[in-house]
């Protein structure tokens, strides 16, 4: 990364270094992240998604099924281990980088594309979606594929005929590029519902230009929509047969009014909404790093101000990058979310940022981008170090507060061993779906562990079509968590004994779980 030290026009020239060494650098990242994937315990959400591989379905309450399909394929091929669970995440995150850099090379010069590669190689955002497997990772990968298809289609409208050659000709006419676009959109929707923002951004970019409306007058755009709908149809069918539970859950989850719950008066609600928005902006600054985020916001303002003078490809990138930030920024004023939700936005916006840099290689903008990449690299190194058990334990001893996503990377194997001792062969049921996933993964033999979320919101376990224990035939159950009285009442148990509490080793709060032996009289 010493190339980051170059300045002025030389810095632009040196950015090509990242293109020349892209494959070796990706190889290093692959080895590093697979090593960390094998070293760290599954996060509670990862373990929960892993349990879905035992109940493959067309949909689940929390998300569409793509993550379950990918985990199932990987663990069936490579075994039930942490690195096998996370292998698709590692590969897809690096695949997203390759696609966006390849797209940048098609529509920008190599100097600008080198900066796109530099930003993503150093990016803590890419490290996060590569280290931890959530639905965001396949959603970003397939959305980036869809973006590349649509971008190449409209790029043909902008480019001179002499610039289009070889395999690029395939994307300049006919149904094939639109079919690929529809397929990728459908796969993205099978990963996460908010992937609909990609086809929405493409549609809005086409609607707002004369050249774009010509595509809407042809059948291929609508054929792409039909393909996407067909790919997504298993999720629609699952929802139709489960009272539209997943659609309604996600709509409430993302657009509810949780952030103002209990607020008294207009001013109090306004302050809470502004606080939520400020938290969102701060989260994005951490995700994309403050310097690059500030530059990106400025590039957004410049492009929207000059919208009707932009090339078709830049309009498309602008819409696809803006919609996630607007939607999740608005949602942040209403309910609590995760800062990684709009992560896809930075893929198209990184190309617009690189184009802005290419307009003046000797300006301060290049210096700021270079400093932003340095800071991003520091963030990424820190993120990798925090994933190591020794580092988090040391920081805990120094009383450094750590986010739960860091502390939750450790201690679950010991959690499983302790539950084995308490259970002594009896069936285990948890009150929290995350604990049920961790118990199932880390207990000896990886037994089926169910979740009965009495006293809390519904979970995916409430909508699984098979596998629920027959409590009438079980005289004894090990129940992990709170609301044990409600569990006994619901399923007719009459006696309860408190067993030694399970304690998760390592730093962090809320690292204990009460354990109960519940029995019935015959």
Image: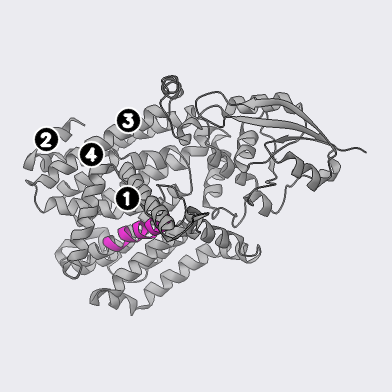
Q: Position of residue 253 (x, y in %)?
A: 52, 56
The answer to whether the residues at label 1 and label 2 have Cβ atoms under 8 Å apart is: no
- Residue occupying image coordinates x 43% and y 62%: 196
Q: Which mark is residue 373?
A: 4
Q: Main secondary structure of the magenta part?
A: helix
**Tag 1 secondary structure:** helix
Q: Residues within 10 Å of mark 2 (few under 14, many from 20)?
A: some
Distance CA(mark 2)–CA(mark 3): 21 Å
Q: Nearer the viewer, mark 2 or mark 4?
A: 4
Distance CA(mark 1)–CA(mark 3): 23 Å
Q: Which mark is residue 99?
A: 1
Range covered by the magenta-colored residues: 318-332
In the rendered structure, the answer to whether residue 467 lies left or right of residue 92 reads: right
Q: Which mark is residue 346?
A: none
- Residue occupying image coordinates x 62% and y 54%: 57
Distance CA(mark 4)–CA(mark 3): 12 Å
Vertical relation: 149 (above or below) 411: below
The answer to whether the residues at label 2 and label 4 have Cβ atoms under 8 Å apart is: no
Q: Which mark is residue 6?
A: 2
Q: Position of residue 36 (x, y in %)?
A: 43, 29
Residue at the spot of label 3: 381
Q: Nearer the viewer, mark 1 or mark 2?
A: 2
Q: In the depicted view, which residue is nearer to us: 20 or 211?
A: 211
Q: Nearer the viewer, mark 4 or mark 1?
A: 4
Image quarter (top left, top right, bottom left or bottom right) of the N terminus = top left
Closer to the chain start, of discs 1 and 3, is 1
**Tag 3 secondary structure:** helix
Closer to the chain start, of discs 2 and 4, is 2
């Amino acid at each position: 990364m010493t190339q980051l030290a170059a300045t002025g026009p030389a810095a632009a020239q040196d950015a090509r270094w990242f293109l020349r060494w892209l494959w070796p650098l990706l190889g290093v990242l692959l080895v590093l992240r697979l090593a960390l994937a094998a070293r760290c315990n599954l996060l509670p959400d990862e373990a929960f998604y892993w349990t879905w591989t035992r109940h493959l379905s067309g949909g689940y309450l929390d998300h569409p099924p793509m993550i379950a399909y990918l985990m199932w394929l990987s663990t069936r091929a490579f075994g039930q281990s942490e690195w096998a669970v996370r292998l698709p995440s590692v590969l897809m995150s690096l695949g997203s980088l390759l696609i966006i850099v390849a797209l940048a090379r098609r529509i920008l010069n190599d100097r600008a594309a080198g900066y796109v590669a530099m930003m993503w190689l150093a990016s803590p955002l890419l490290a996060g979606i590569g280290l931890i497997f959530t639905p965001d990772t396949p959603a970003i990968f397939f959305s980036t594929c869809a973006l590349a298809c649509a971008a190449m289609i409209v790029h043909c409208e902008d480019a001179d005929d002499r610039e289009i050659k070889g395999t690029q000709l395939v994307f300049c006419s006919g149904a094939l590029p639109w079919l690929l676009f529809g397929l990728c959109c459908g796969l993205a929707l099978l990963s996460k519902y908010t992937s609909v923002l990609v086809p929405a951004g493409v549609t809005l970019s086409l609607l707002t230009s004369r050249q774009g409306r010509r595509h809407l007058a042809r059948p291929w755009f609508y054929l792409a929509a039909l393909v996407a709908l067909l790919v997504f149809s298993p999720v629609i069918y699952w929802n139709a047969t489960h009272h539209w539970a997943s659609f309604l859950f996600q709509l409430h989850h993302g657009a509810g009014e949780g952030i103002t719950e209990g607020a008294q008066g207009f001013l109090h609600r306004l302050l809470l909404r502004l606080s939520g928005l400020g938290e969102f902006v701060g989260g994005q600054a951490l995700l994309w790093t403050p310097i690059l985020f500030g530059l990106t916001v400025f590039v957004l303002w410049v492009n929207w101000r000059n919208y009707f003078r932009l090339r078709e490809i830049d309009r498309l990138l602008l819409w696809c990058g803006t919609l996630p930030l607007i939607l999740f920024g608005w949602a942040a004023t209403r309910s609590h979310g995760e800062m990684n939700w709009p992560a896809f936005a930075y893929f198209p916006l990184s190309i617009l940022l690189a184009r802005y840099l290419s307009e003046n290689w000797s300006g301060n903008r290049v210096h700021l981008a270079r400093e932003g990449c340095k800071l991003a690299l520091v963030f990424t190194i820190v993120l990798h170090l925090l994933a190591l058990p020794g580092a988090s334990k040391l920081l805990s001893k120094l009383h450094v507060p750590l986010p739960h996503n860091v502390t939750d990377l450790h201690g679950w194997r010991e959690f499983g061993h302790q539950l084995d001792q308490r259970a002594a062969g009896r069936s285990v049921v948890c009150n929290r779906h995350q604990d049920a996933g961790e118990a199932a993964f880390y207990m000896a033999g990886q037994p089926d562990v169910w979740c009965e979320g009495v006293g809390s919101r519904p979970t995916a376990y409430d909508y699984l079509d098979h596998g629920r224990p027959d409590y009438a035939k079980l005289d004894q159950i090990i129940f992990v968590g709170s609301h044990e009285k409600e569990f006994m009442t619901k399923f007719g148990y009459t006696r309860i004994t408190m067993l030694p509490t399970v304690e998760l080793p390592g730093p962090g709060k809320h690292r204990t779980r009460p354990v109960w032996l519940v029995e019935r009289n015959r």
